Image: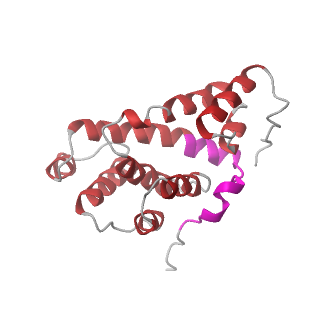
């Protein structure tokens, strides 16, 4: 942790933090360090948990959702979220090769998933100001207008978690450490 943020002992927290930790325990089976660190701002921690609870309500299936989430994590260089999402996704059937391509910000073999990765990247890079041509390419690849808005939802959630992790320097939970990640170094000029 950085900037004076610390992790709390889940067995000693009270009040709003206790409620948040109980909710995290129910959803994840433990209190991830992201929830612990974010509990300094109960509104942030609770918003994150509530938004994560809506992931399965989007039009994207778990693999498609992972493509969007991991693309955003990598673009935002979130040292916590990349390994956390890799761990969960691989545990739930996402192929290692797909996740590795996402972690390296490389094109995907599946054309439709690649169009989702590209559209997500364009949305993040251009702060939502995609061109009509970029939007139409996404639709022409077989995606719906709802899927485009679901990408906006995921960007919202990942902005919250990625930026929060940048400020707190969230320690990677032991369960996620085998998937630790560092951004690819820019080529020397």
Identify the residue at image location x=14%, y=51%.
140
Residue 181: where, in percent of width, then height? 59, 64
Q: Is residue 41 visible?
A: no
| Residue 25 within the segment the image draws in magenta | no
In the image, farthest residue toward the bottom: 189
Residue 70's spot in the image, x, y percent? 46, 54
In the foreground, 109 or 158: 109
- Point 33% across, 56% down: residue: 117
Which image quadrant for residue 19?
A: top right
Going by the picture, which residue comes out furthest to the right?
12
Quick one: 73 or 163, which is closer to the camera? Answer: 73
Q: Is residue 150 above or below residue 175?
A: above
Is residue 85 toward the left or the right of residue 11 in the image? left
Q: Nearer the viewer, residue 12 or 158?
A: 12
Expressed as whole percent of the image width and height from the top left, the position of residue 132 reads: 18, 45
Residue 85 shows up from this direction: yes
Q: Position of residue 135 (x, y in %)?
A: 21, 46
Residue placed at 56% from the left, 33% from the top?
48
Is the stretch drawn in magenta largely helix, strand or loop?
helix
Q: Residue furthest top?
A: 15
Q: Is residue 63 left or right of residue 52?
A: left
What number of labels is visible? Answer: 0
Colour setup of the view: secondary structure
Image quarter for residue 113? bottom left
Magenta part of the protein: which range? Answer: 161-183
In the image, is 26 to the left or to the right of 174? Answer: left
């Amino acid at each position: 942790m950085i900037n004076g943020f610390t992790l709390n002992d889940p067995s000693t927290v009270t009040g709003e933090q206790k409620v948040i930790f109980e909710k995290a325990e129910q959803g994840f089976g433990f209190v991830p360090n992201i929830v612990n660190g974010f509990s300094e701002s109960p509104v942030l921690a609770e918003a994150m948990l509530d938004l994560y609870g809506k992931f399965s309500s989007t039009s994207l299936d778990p693999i498609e959702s992972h493509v969007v989430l991991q693309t955003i994590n990598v673009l935002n260089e979130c040292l916590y979220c990349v390994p956390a999402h890799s761990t969960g996704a691989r545990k739930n059937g996402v192929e290692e090769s797909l996740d590795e391509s996402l972690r390296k910000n490389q094109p995907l073999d599946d054309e439709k998933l690649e169009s989702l990765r590209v559209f997500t990247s364009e949305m993040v890079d251009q702060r939502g100001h995609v061109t009509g041509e970029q939007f139409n390419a996404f639709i022409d690849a077989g995606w719906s207008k709802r899927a485009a808005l679901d990408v906006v939802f995921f960007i919202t959630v990942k902005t919250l978690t990625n930026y929060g992790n940048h400020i707190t320097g969230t320690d990677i939970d032991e369960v996620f450490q085998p998937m630790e990640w560092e951004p690819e170094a820019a080529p020397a000029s």
